[in-house]
Amino acid sequence: MIRVAVVGASGYTGGELLRLLAVHQGVEVKMATSREYAGKPVGMVHPNLRGVYSMNFSQFSVDKLGREVDTVFLALPHGVSMNYVPELLQIGIQVVDLSADYRLKDPSLYKRWYDLEHPHPDLLKQAVYGLPELHGEELSGAKLIASPGCNATATILALAPLMGWREGDRFISDVKVGSSEGGAKPSEGSHHPERQNAIRPYETEGHRHEAEAEQELSRLAGREVKVSIIPHAVSSIRGALASVHSWVSNVEEVEVWKRFAEFYRGKPFIRIVRRGFHPYPDPKYVIGSNYADLGFALDSRLGRLTTFGAIDNMMKGAAGQAVQAFNLSRGFQENEGLKIPPLRPG
Amino acid sequence: MIRVAVVGASGYTGGELLRLLAVHQGVEVKMATSREYAGKPVGMVHPNLRGVYSMNFSQFSVDKLGREVDTVFLALPHGVSMNYVPELLQIGIQVVDLSADYRLKDPSLYKRWYDLEHPHPDLLKQAVYGLPELHGEELSGAKLIASPGCNATATILALAPLMGWREGDRFISDVKVGSSEGGAKPSEGSHHPERQNAIRPYETEGHRHEAEAEQELSRLAGREVKVSIIPHAVSSIRGALASVHSWVSNVEEVEVWKRFAEFYRGKPFIRIVRRGFHPYPDPKYVIGSNYADLGFALDSRLGRLTTFGAIDNMMKGAAGQAVQAFNLSRGFQENEGLKIPPLRPG
Amino acid sequence: MIRVAVVGASGYTGGELLRLLAVHQGVEVKMATSREYAGKPVGMVHPNLRGVYSMNFSQFSVDKLGREVDTVFLALPHGVSMNYVPELLQIGIQVVDLSADYRLKDPSLYKRWYDLEHPHPDLLKQAVYGLPELHGEELSGAKLIASPGCNATATILALAPLMGWREGDRFISDVKVGSSEGGAKPSEGSHHPERQNAIRPYETEGHRHEAEAEQELSRLAGREVKVSIIPHAVSSIRGALASVHSWVSNVEEVEVWKRFAEFYRGKPFIRIVRRGFHPYPDPKYVIGSNYADLGFALDSRLGRLTTFGAIDNMMKGAAGQAVQAFNLSRGFQENEGLKIPPLRPG
Amino acid sequence: MIRVAVVGASGYTGGELLRLLAVHQGVEVKMATSREYAGKPVGMVHPNLRGVYSMNFSQFSVDKLGREVDTVFLALPHGVSMNYVPELLQIGIQVVDLSADYRLKDPSLYKRWYDLEHPHPDLLKQAVYGLPELHGEELSGAKLIASPGCNATATILALAPLMGWREGDRFISDVKVGSSEGGAKPSEGSHHPERQNAIRPYETEGHRHEAEAEQELSRLAGREVKVSIIPHAVSSIRGALASVHSWVSNVEEVEVWKRFAEFYRGKPFIRIVRRGFHPYPDPKYVIGSNYADLGFALDSRLGRLTTFGAIDNMMKGAAGQAVQAFNLSRGFQENEGLKIPPLRPG
């Protein structure tokens, strides 16, 4: 049994980790920390977990973690994880960090995208970008996993099979996302009367997930790839669909199909969607699961290729993917704790 | 390994059974029948199950079932199950029937409530009403399980602890339900532009679930209990909340609380909700799980007691409860296949 | 042209008043006050009103109102309007108060229900409860109109025709309401991921609208009537449905129907709903309008009568009703500014 | 008073026309035809219009129309209007056709896009494409108005100011649309449990509105423009947002801003959105109105320009725009019948 802790466990991502780890047969959740709710029962903050956990939230303490756990899942805001990671690693704790703090390899990018100097640039090399479909082997034994962002995950998975081919290297990822992406803290924009029925573009000019998407896709392509991500808030709670557009010429469907089929062969959480009643990926049909449904549409008259990536942003876009990467790092079955199929209808 | 089949597997309830049975460690799903989709892949009709099942739907055949399975889950319309059950029992197959066909003990009630003569009144005695919180012991070894209706489940669970006390025996169950209760077949009323944002009373005069609710509650009370159920369609997809109103006198909160706590002691899928940020049951926080969250509100100025029952109508209101009852009948752990906690947010 | 001001114009009710008054042919909106947004354009806070109003919000000032307007609509929190009203009346301004501050005739009730001593009990007599279907004549020339609460409106309209009959005088109003009832200020409970898909009881024990409902209904009945209101938050943004339950004996449908038809004869905003594809009131079909759709369902087996009141809580439940009452007070056509039919689908 | 009829009045677009014409001060609605519901009350099919119209639906009859009306609004499926138009024109009736049947100038395009031979190619020249912001002058006195498609309207309005500039002529319009776009007829895809929470691409390869969008934009540009429209079904009922993407170089915000401001100067239904709490167009804030909110976002790092067009698809995307064009054709004020501001919240 691996003993684990979830740090920052009162937010949505932390709660989702607790939900998944509760049915993971290889772990024991020893601790859930929350500055705001320390001393309060987990089930008070997460009413879905009433009766599932009897523990209370505790204060974050490196010492206590050192004594009690083997792995820490960090579900903290960007800029906060940064400082905890080195200490945790030093005392031998494996870290799965769900913030952006260790996703980028080039330290200078933190300045540009997150407006901060990275205090531990050396650790960036050690960190494994936790997208198991791209870094499966590196994850084995990884001590520091930097779990990807949701919009980046949907975009990267929709584009990876096209990397390095003869067509262009500039893409527009028009993402539609549910309200859970914004986290558990209320705001004017998340107020139900304003958020429901919205189709609202946001962070339209320089979305931060572009940095990690370009890093991963350029690596795959072997040359510089550019991705402009433009998210739109839509009415659902969970779910993100990336529609990634590009102009192509002389491309036929069968070629795209083959690239996807080959690239993702044997990947348990990838489903390639192309035929039947539901011929395109729709996040609706992955809700509650770690699947990424991928597909594409080719407008041959104009040469517009759109590849689609549909995920549950709380799962494959956050907690589910973190558990998947953790599983690979520890030699568990890749889908341990992630077996329940998506809801329908849901 | 118990070999099972789901009959009527292309509807929502059938699909939900397949979803749960896929992760049940004591069963093997051998067959999924559908008249309409026989020969088509399960994942074509249930896009959530793409990659989960590789089988095709097959035609219903008693012979084939007899050769291949031990237990059949019937997810068929009312009036259809009726005729299949005796044959299946006769060849030794255990039947979990999710229709209303074997729920009522008194054959004459089928005439009154369902407008049909029951062809096998003798089997009604044998059938166990599959509400495990009330019939846990009878379920052990049961050959024919009549799985309860969703609105009946929410109503019965919200009322059971009050049965037989000094207060009155007449209740109004004002139920609010999501759209999945209507099944998978499109209609004018389920058309999204008409259904979304609706707060629509329906079947307001003689809802059929009253029959089974009154049967079960009267049995518990040891005297005749009357329940008027009035459902309202609201915007969610999953979820049902029964707000069961009655007039009381000289009742104090602590008494109600105690009755609930004692009645449901040790029941793994019952959560009694009374304090904290979410002091009343809300189906939102049981979605995807088999929990029933129960609670109450006492308006002491006027003597109005409202008890609440919140369930996921697809789970505790249908497929989840069927699996729970099946587990007890076969000696499995009560929550086998039903372990994943509810979604949040969802 | 009546010159009007909306005080507290940055909230939802204030914004809805501005929206309606913009097309009212007998008024000119001279001022919209907001403490928080004074100096900012109306269209910045209310994006729906961009291009409709070119004015900025201003600070509240009795002097300025005295110079510039004839009527003030107060869209302020309970307890705040109280203090402004006397001054405004004294300088000859008509007041339409949308708070609860002048709704109750008996000053002692403010202590019990709102926990405050009413500073101007004398004005309570002068105030007209602005439900035009009950107080149409008194409204003519009224100087102080106390506009009713939304849940009270739906409940009173659904019950008024039954008052004074031979049946009982105790009712349970199970109300289902959209999220706009909570106002424009974000909170944990209004956070979209928590609020969407909720079916959440709240203020279950002593909802304040009971006070005004009992006042109005008892007056109609000529004897003491008790109403227990229990609201439930559901997923829509606009809309409230009151399902008002009571036990009756020897009541036939035709009698109820007649009482409704006679009571509301000639009332332009009341629609009695009983037949056709949509046999019960559903707030969905009044959205954007000032209609109240009323109807009922009689469960004759058990003697449960449910009467329904469906309104758009922002319109007949707040701003629309205030404009309707204002119209009657000033001799305008009752539906001036309120002519646009409800949306469908919407 | 212009006497008008709505043909095909039982669908959503027909109902919306009836809703708007009910408050239009220059028209009298003499007839509403429906093959399916002839003889039935208008309010039975459109519950929002109960009490608004007392008339019944009637059968379509050219003779009767000839005797009783001056203008006919055709809300019929594509391919059906085609055949009625010539007869109606011949007997002197003005036709506002909301189908696609007279939108395209080049008859050969009907073959390619709608797979039918146009039976009256001569009338195509006479028809005025009813987008008032582009064809205001031609609409004056127009006898045949071809009212634009919803996705085409959102796309054209978002692109028109850019036409003919130095940048490229190839665009991707990623549209997000509510469920009312699919009309009033239920289907598997519109079934609430399937449609709610969907983010579902459809008609991804050759959406028919591309034909009219390219016609209008090429005309404006003076050269051939290509637009690939890819719609996505999202959860709202009303509302469409076109996010129109293109790659640009050396473009600055101020230039785009100026082109929009100048192009739409004085257009009463265009609102250009750029600053404040809601810096991008969101269809949410035009619901119930005829406004089109336009705006843009420039990703200067990568040279991605996105222009946005947000409309209520039932209004500016269908019935509202038809009334607006009719107003111009008859010399009414452009916003007659269209004055009510959008809902908020809604």
Image (cartoon, coloured by chain):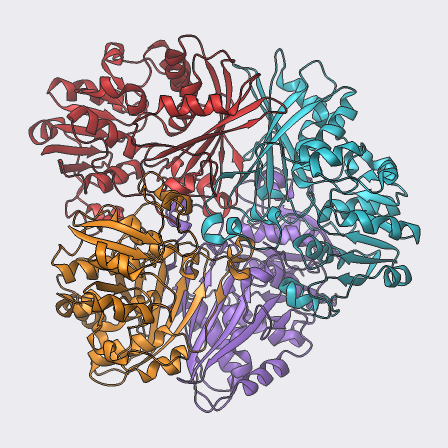
Chain colours: A cyan, B purple, C orange, D red
**Who is closer to the viewer here, B330 or A120?**
A120
**Who is closer to the viewer here, B183 or A302?**
A302
The extreme top residue here reads: D223
Taking the spot 23% from the left edge, 40% from the top edge, the residue there is D20
Coordinates of residue D97 in the picture (x, y in percent)? 25, 25
- The vertical placement of B325 against C38, above or below, is below
Taking the spot 51% from the left edge, 64% from the top edge, the residue there is B149
One can see residue B58 in this view = no
Taking the spot 61% from the left edge, 55% from the top edge, the residue there is A184
**Who is closer to the viewer here, A201 or C123?**
C123
- The vertical placement of D324 against B209, above or below, is above
The extreme left residue here reads: D67
- Image quadrant holding the C terminus of chain B, namely bottom right
Residue A141 found in image quarter: top right
The extreme right residue here reads: A91
Q: Tag count in the figure?
A: 0
Coordinates of residue B157 in the picture (x, y in percent)? 55, 73
- Left or right of A24? Residue D176 is left
- The vertical placement of C210 against A226, above or below, is below
Coordinates of residue B57 in the picture (x, y in percent)? 61, 42
One can see residue D16 in this view = yes
- Left or right of A264? Residue C192 is left
**Who is closer to the viewer here, B163 or C9?**
C9
- Image quadrant holding the N terminus of chain B, namely bottom right
Coordinates of residue B206 in the picture (x, y in percent)? 37, 68
- Left or right of A146? Residue D29 is left
- The vertical placement of D115 against D334, above or below, is above
